[in-house]
Amino acid sequence: MAVIVQKYGGSSVADLEKIQNIAKRVIQTRENGNDVVVVLSAMAGETSRLIQMADSASGGAADGREYDVLVSSGEQVSISLLSIVLNGMGHKAMSLLGHQVKILTNKIYGNARILSIDTGLISDELKRGKIVVVAGFQGVDEDGNITTLGRGGSDTSAVAIAASLKADFCEIFTDVNGVYTTDPNLYSKARKLKKVSYDEMLSLAGAGAKVLHPRSVELAKAYGVPVYVRSSFSEDMGTLVTKEDKDMEREVVSGVAYDRDQAKITISHVPDKPGIAAKLFTPLSDHDIIVDMIIQNASSKGYTDLTFTVSQKDIGEAKRLLDAVAGDIGVSRIDYDENISKISVVGVGMQSHSGVASKMFAVFAEEGINILMISTSEIKISCVVAAKYTELAVRVLHDAFGLEQEN
Amino acid sequence: MAVIVQKYGGSSVADLEKIQNIAKRVIQTRENGNDVVVVLSAMAGETSRLIQMADSASGGAADGREYDVLVSSGEQVSISLLSIVLNGMGHKAMSLLGHQVKILTNKIYGNARILSIDTGLISDELKRGKIVVVAGFQGVDEDGNITTLGRGGSDTSAVAIAASLKADFCEIFTDVNGVYTTDPNLYSKARKLKKVSYDEMLSLAGAGAKVLHPRSVELAKAYGVPVYVRSSFSEDMGTLVTKEDKDMEREVVSGVAYDRDQAKITISHVPDKPGIAAKLFTPLSDHDIIVDMIIQNASSKGYTDLTFTVSQKDIGEAKRLLDAVAGDIGVSRIDYDENISKISVVGVGMQSHSGVASKMFAVFAEEGINILMISTSEIKISCVVAAKYTELAVRVLHDAFGLEQEN
């Protein structure tokens, strides 16, 4: 008998009919002889509605503790409804809130981190033959205050519970039926991957593939939890996210990702002295602005140019912060460009293949796509290009690396 | 410095504007130098919406434990929203759910009784200068399962918290501004009472005045908690519900109540033997059908007639249960009448005044209102009459006992 954690997102519990459908799937899994723990998000739109309420009530500055009490109420509705439906279908089911489990977190309201999960109650109820339905996205701090986990919270809850229970695997049911070589909405030749490694998944997710939140992938990698990304609306087995194996090495490139949400900032004529980079970036990190790519050109006559990218939503605040330090540092000019896109080629196999970068640059050159920035990691090469080239860049790379066919 | 518990019902927290209004009232009370504990219901309509969801998901037979998890989510929203608003207005406020307080109940889901309230956390937070906002209607059993208190639950929560904290008084804010001599919607000459005793309030509430649930009044009486019934939309001091005092004795009759929700059942030719009443009423009480008035006529030739009233919603089930035992007992006939109304005259003063009943009967006779049943208690006389006489009966009694003027 396997222990399986199944996580269903908001679109899978959007209404009673959908809840009844996932109840059937949960029961099928149970009747196949498995212990099942279900982790749920709030019904589609509910968390947004609650956040909207908090914002209206506070002009966007809600007290953190109370904000979490408010937004965590959505999962309470979905888990109890599914449990009612499962009990009505003749299967014993029991809902558990974060504090009932208990999922202990730190005290960072709105973006709490899980410290530990007490699996005692879940295990006891599984032994009694129950299906256990746990609220995703929420936990409790050591003083009994409700906390929420922030973006991707329910995926993180599911993987953390699977890790703590030493579950055989974790299934993440969503509205797509797996991880693709690229966004199928952008290129119809995109192919679903049967397997992808944790690191590839992280690169794909970090580069804009929104299937799984990086936090949950990192957690799955740390604890070696096999994760299936599946559609709640089909029987397709989806994509297995797991550790690297021999099979994977055959594919040099697994996918092409893009991210239109970046903005590029270029600071010209920066004095090339120790401490300058810290002066520029410390205020940004103090304000939780994530800087993605950073490029510094070779120094010329004691001065250099610095280019980096931030999320588009942060560009206004970044401008304010940089203007405040610019004079101090003696910077001559700062340019901002929001019309950019980051295109990434991802694959575990590229670690041992030198030709990927040169092929990528050659393909762009052929199509007349100018490369504005380049960054590389062991399993990813990213280029920033003008936003208007996004679709073209993805399609030509997908073709060039033969992603349409399985290798 | 007084400790005041303020309870606001669903209509008082129906939208953000109303929540902002009650926040101002809470702050005013705080700034007057009091410690304030606020108890809230869910936003108007929310609990009904959640119950509707539970019923749709289960065909009206939701698992009790899960039903309570679902319907208790409404208060979580209202308490966190008010706390967000209070914090936004510069006052430290903290919401507490039933399990956080903790409000310990028995395990009767949907209709749990409060066993004890731990006031430690509330007192600590009050000492830290906080306004404490507690979810009404909900508690937690000894195993950490969420329970709800059933009808009138939030009033009961408020009074129980006031009793446990030894609060100076409890204010119940609602959409009426006090307790009236009769329903102002039915008779425009109805007068608001400044004071009413617990027992009078119980008689008025039990007879159909829906201002306070009898459970909360009983609790207030048991612990001697002074309760103000006030409107959340005016500054009026409302009605004080308290123990009897000299002032009250002056008024012989305090009010006239009516209840259109009763149905009359007459069982004819019942063998007048021990055990028969038990055979008839035990199945009803086993099915939680509350029998209100019971009249048994004098026996004639070993047989008697038995008349009693039940709530109209229970009449179908009562029929089914009574038909099942009728043959067994040898009953010849059962009549049902739903077109009735119960009219009650209530007053602590009538204990020492013999003329109230005769005056009531005389007034009815004058107007040609036929009395179908009579029952009396120390502070109440109730008559069942045909439903069509409801308004007339209330108005002529109100006039006859001079309720328009303060005595």
Image (tube, coloured by chain):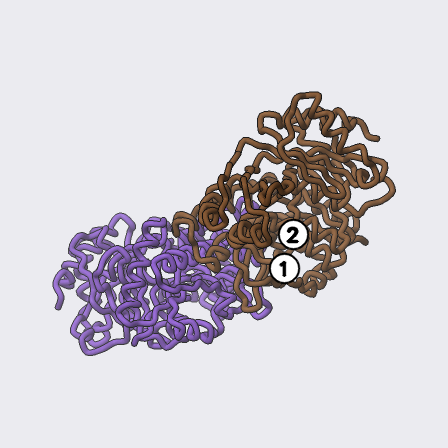
Chain colours: A brown, B purple
Q: Which mark is residue A156?
A: 2
Q: Which mark is residue B225?
A: none
Left or right: residue B81 compared with residue A234: left
Residue B387 lies, in percent from the top left, at: 29, 50
Residue B176 lies, in percent from the top left, at: 27, 56
Q: Pinpoint the chain carrying mark 1.
A: A
Specify the quadrant that holds the N terminus of chain A: bottom right
Q: Secondary structure at mark 1?
A: strand
Q: In the rendered view, would you say A262 is above or below B14? A: above
Specify the quadrant that holds the C terminus of chain A: top right
Q: Are marks 2 and 1 in contact (CB under 8 Å)?
A: yes
What is the CA distance from the residue labelled 2 to the residue labelled 1?
9 Å
Amino acid on which the number 1 mark rests in the picture:
Ile
Q: Pinpoint the chain carrying mark 2.
A: A
Amino acid on which the number 2 mark rests in the picture:
Thr
- Looking at marks 2 and 1 on the same chain, the residue that comes earlier in the sequence is marked by 1
| Mark 1 nearby-residue class (10 Å; few <14, some 14–19, many ≥20) | many
- Residue placed under numbered mark 1 in the picture: A114
Residue B168 lies, in percent from the top left, at: 31, 75
Residue B266 lies, in percent from the top left, at: 40, 56
